Image (tube, rainbow, N blue to C red):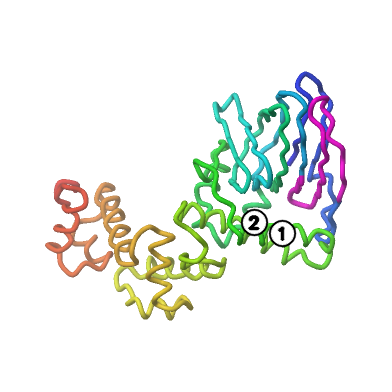
């Protein structure tokens, strides 16, 4: 992963970073503080490089209106605006991002050149946690359900932001971000903790998308990475037993979560009840099986656990407004 900033019209990069040049020793991190000086824009950047990415803690001030050009290789960026506001964009993609104080977002950037617009008198403080794609995929593997859109963007080599508009930075996010930064001086003895905190921070961002502006940190059922993991385990168990799905109590016990949190949390994360999700999944699968013309209606009913073809047909028509016999 490579990247940096440069003066508009100049070729000199400040804070050029290349994580491939950092020692691959799992217990090592490199730290540096560099001045920011682009004429009307000045400040400082504290940079931490590790095997898999880099963290930027930036403070910048603008004496005049100014456009700073940025260069980025393929990477995933966790962005938190702490003070001020930040307007950035990628002209080639036609994208523009505006993030204010106490807001955040999560991005996938392709190999591209972008810009950072400053206004006269502007003061901004922000944190960018940049992860190379392989490292991101490695540490989020157990939470594929949460980051499937971001993973698809990586596979398809396209830009994306996980939320169309910036998300409010909650008190919990601030606490976890502080934990991430506290890890750095003691990185040699806290690598596992550091990685867990990075994942927790991204899951909190995912949680922000699920709840939107309605989340006030007290009415959310899912609050921890463990909650998300248990709900995903429940979903996987459910889909593995389409023919004979477990009851809610059985599913809660098998996934290590109480039935109340299963019911409420499942609706929060997957935007459907447990049984509603199962029904929707089965009907979508049935539609695909029939379209492939490799299974009869009776075979689909048997494989997906429908008690009778008539029951299946009624559900199918209610969902797709067509009889399954018209698909075969």
Circle 2 or circle 1, nearest the eye:
1
- Residue 220, image x and y in percent? 47, 65
Residue that carries the numbered disc 2 in the rendered image: 138
Q: Nearer the viewer, residue 80 or 149?
A: 80
User: Eyeballing the image, is 161 above or below 87?
Assistant: below
- Name the quarter where the N terminus is drawn: top right
- Residue 113, image x and y in percent? 67, 28
| 174 horizontally vs 226: left or right | right
- Residue 170, image x and y in percent? 58, 57
- Magenta stretch in the rendered image: 31-57
| 281 horizontally vs 126: left or right | left
Q: Does dot 2 land on a helix, a strand or a loop?
A: helix
Residue that carries the numbered disc 1 in the rendered image: 178
- Quick check: is 81 in the magenta stretch? no
Q: Nearer the viewer, residue 176 or 311?
A: 176
Residue 77 is drawn in which quadrant? top right
User: Eyeballing the image, is 296 above or below 230?
Assistant: above
- Residue 212, image x and y in percent? 46, 52
Secondary structure mostly seen in the magenta stretch: strand
| Residue at the limit of the structure toward the top, as seen here | 9
- Quick check: is 56 in the magenta stretch? yes
Q: Residue at x 27, y 64 (%)?
A: 304
User: Eyeballing the image, is 70 above or below 247?
Assistant: above
Q: Residues within 10 Å of mark 2 (few under 14, many from 20)?
A: few
| 110 horizontally vs 34: left or right | left
Q: Are marks 2 and 1 in contact (CB under 8 Å)?
A: no
User: How far apart are labels 2 and 1 at the CA level?
Assistant: 23 Å
Q: Residue at x 63, y 33 (%)?
A: 87
Residue 211 is drawn in which quadrant? bottom left
Q: Residue at x 30, y 53 (%)?
A: 284
Q: Residue at x 83, y 64 (%)?
A: 186
């Amino acid at each position: 992963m490579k990247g940096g900033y440069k003066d508009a019209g100049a070729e000199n990069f400040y804070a050029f970073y290349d994580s491939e040049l950092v020692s691959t020793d799992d217990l090592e991190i490199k730290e540096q503080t560099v001045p920011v000086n682009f004429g009307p824009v000045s400040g400082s950047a504290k940079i931490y490089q590790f095997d898999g990415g880099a963290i930027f803690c930036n403070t910048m001030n603008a004496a005049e209106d100014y456009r700073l050009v940025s260069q980025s290789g393929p990477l995933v960026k966790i962005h938190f605006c702490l003070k001020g506001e930040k307007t950035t964009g990628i002209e080639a993609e036609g994208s523009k991002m505006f993030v204010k104080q106490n807001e955040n977002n999560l991005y996938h950037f392709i190999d591209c050149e972008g810009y950072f617009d400053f206004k006269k008198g502007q003061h901004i403080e922000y944190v960018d946690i940049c992860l190379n794609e392989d490292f991101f995929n490695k540490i989020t593997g157990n939470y594929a359900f949460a980051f499937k859109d971001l993973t698809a963007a990586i596979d398809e080599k396209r830009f994306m932001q996980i939320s169309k508009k910036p998300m409010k930075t909650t008190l919990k996010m601030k606490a976890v971000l502080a934990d991430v930064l506290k890890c750095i001086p003691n990185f040699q003895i806290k690598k596992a903790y550091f990685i867990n905190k990075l994942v927790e921070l991204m899951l909190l961002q995912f949680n922000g998308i699920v709840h939107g502006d309605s989340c006030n940190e007290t009415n959310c059922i899912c609050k921890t990475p463990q909650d998300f993991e248990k709900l995903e385990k429940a979903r996987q168990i459910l889909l593995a037993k389409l023919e004979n799905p477990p009851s809610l109590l059985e599913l809660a016990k098998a996934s290590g979560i109480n039935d109340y949190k299963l019911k409420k949390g499942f609706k929060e994360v997957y935007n459907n009840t447990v049984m509603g999700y199962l029904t929707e999944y089965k009907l979508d699968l049935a539609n695909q099986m029939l379209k492939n013309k490799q299974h009869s209606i009776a075979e689909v009913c048997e494989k997906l656990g429908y008690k009778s073809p008539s029951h299946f047909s009624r559900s199918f028509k209610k969902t797709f407004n067509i009889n399954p016999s018209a698909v075969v």
